[in-house]
Amino acid sequence: MLGNDDWWRDAVVYQVYPRSFADADGDGTGDLKGVRERLGYLAGLGVDAIWLSPFYTSPMADGGYDVADYRDVDPMFGSLADFDALVAEAHDRGVRVIVDLVPNHSSDRHPWFQAGLRDRYVFRDRPNDWESIFGGPAWTQVEDGQWYLHLFAPEQPDLNWDNPEVRAEFRDILRFWLDRGVDGFRVDVAHGMVKAEGLPDVGPKEGRQAEMLGDERVPYFDQDGVHDIYREWRPILDSYPGGRMAVAEAWVSSPERLARYVGPDELHQAFNFEFMMADFHAKSFRTVIEKSLAEAELVGAPTTWVLSNHDKPRHVTRHGGLARARAATLLMLALPGSAYLYNGEELGLPEVLDLPDELRQDPAFRRTGESRDGCRVPVPWTSAPGCGWNDPWLPIPESWTSLSAEAQEHDPGSTLNLYRAALRLRKEHPALGGGTLRWLEAPKDVLAIERDPGLVVVLNTGEEPIAPVVPGTVLLASGPLAADGSIPPDTAVWIQR
């Protein structure tokens, strides 16, 4: 039915944040039935797979990344039967399903923590100087005076991966979801789990300790022992038919370190966050692209390209407007490897910056003032008030009625239809997807890339219009071209030689 075990090498994967994607029962929270109802939309968009952010049983202290039961669906999202129906219909439509796996920590409501099975978590008699990613100390004291580690929220105790029972449990969790037909896993905090022996202090530091990767790795991330875990997981993935895969969320200090997560005996892919954080400038993009492709060559695996996700501001806002976001999208979709989209980016949604403080739910906001809620506002489906949602869990800006899927459906110049056209060409054109690229000479502040056979991508990040660089037929442009065919600022084009 789906075929092609190497599908992930050049796939376009669409991240669904279930709470914010589509609400089938009208309670203001997205659910699995809502995702299933929109599978026709996703298949029509042209994606190869969807990645579901956590939908497991959870008290939602961190948006579902605090898992209380790794083998069940939280009632707010539906049931296991809803999940099974979603997978079956997605496969019928030719769309694969990737689920999130959260192995660094559980919820403090997990049965292990509730039962006091401390050997399955990281406890000690006194805290060290480690800090939480969400700000403040990474340790919380319990009634008998001991302290437990939580690199994220206090409600997310870190699991002890030195315990063989923890390792065995997650091997079984992998099999549970693979048996239900999932096509892969996105591994949350894939550089975590293993901590340096003895839990040594970090010592003197500048700025937030959690941001210290650089050349000196912190003792709680990117430890060599994490690779033993993935070498245990890979045979499990390989034992199932159909090209089951795993992609790492790994924030590490160098391309060489990131490359270690990917290979025939570990994971299949690792997210390329440097591309997501690049500036909208030809030099910045080129530097990251060259570095990323060199990194991929180290292990003979394709790289991934990401512009937005559930943790970072949407790229419409980050890059300085819709025109730049559309141009960056055409660049991304023309690069060799796979691309990961975030729900709503195909509508050109900006970051919501003015959410009332009392409505924000990101646990990091309470500790640091930083919030990821602005990129998690529900997706607007209709042009009516509420955009197809009844009292959504985060308020949808009134201005989004003009950005709704309904409003953009029949507008040939809409961002939604730009994505559809780009994804259709990506499937049809032999130059797109996997393969290599060649840099062409171009004016300052301009990127020009050739993909064989015969497709040239030009991105103008400068302040003046430029000639098309090469002669040919324009297949797709991120915005209107000038009457003489020149490419305006903040515009990308695909040209067939």
Image: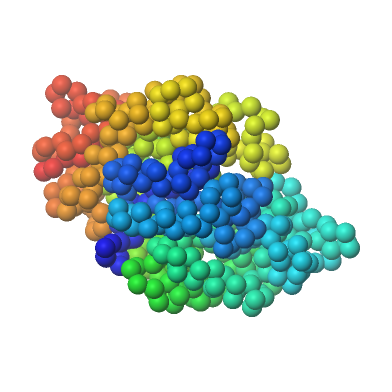
Quick one: 216 or 48, which is closer to the camera?
48
Quadrant showing the N terminus? bottom left
Q: Please tell me which residue is depicted at 48% across the width and 57% down the height of the picture.
A: 81
Q: Is residue 11 left or right of residue 473?
A: right
Tell me if residue 29 can be seen. Answer: yes
- Indicate whether 422 appears above or below 388: below
Tell me if residue 254 can be seen. Answer: no
On the image, the x and y values in percent for residue 23 come to 49, 39
Quadrant showing the C terminus? top left
Residue at the extreme right of the image, as rendered = 144
On the image, the x and y values in percent for residue 388 come to 45, 30
- Indicate whether 461 appears above or below 151: above
Q: Please tell me which residue is depicted at 45% across the width and 69% down the height of the picture.
A: 179
Q: Please tell me which residue is depicted at 33% across the width and 57% down the height of the picture.
A: 91
Q: Is residue 436 left or right of residue 180?
A: left
Q: How many marks?
A: 0
Q: How is the image coloured?
A: rainbow
On the image, the x and y values in percent for residue 184 come to 42, 62
On the image, the x and y values in percent for residue 236 come to 45, 75
Q: Is residue 354 left or right of residue 342?
A: right
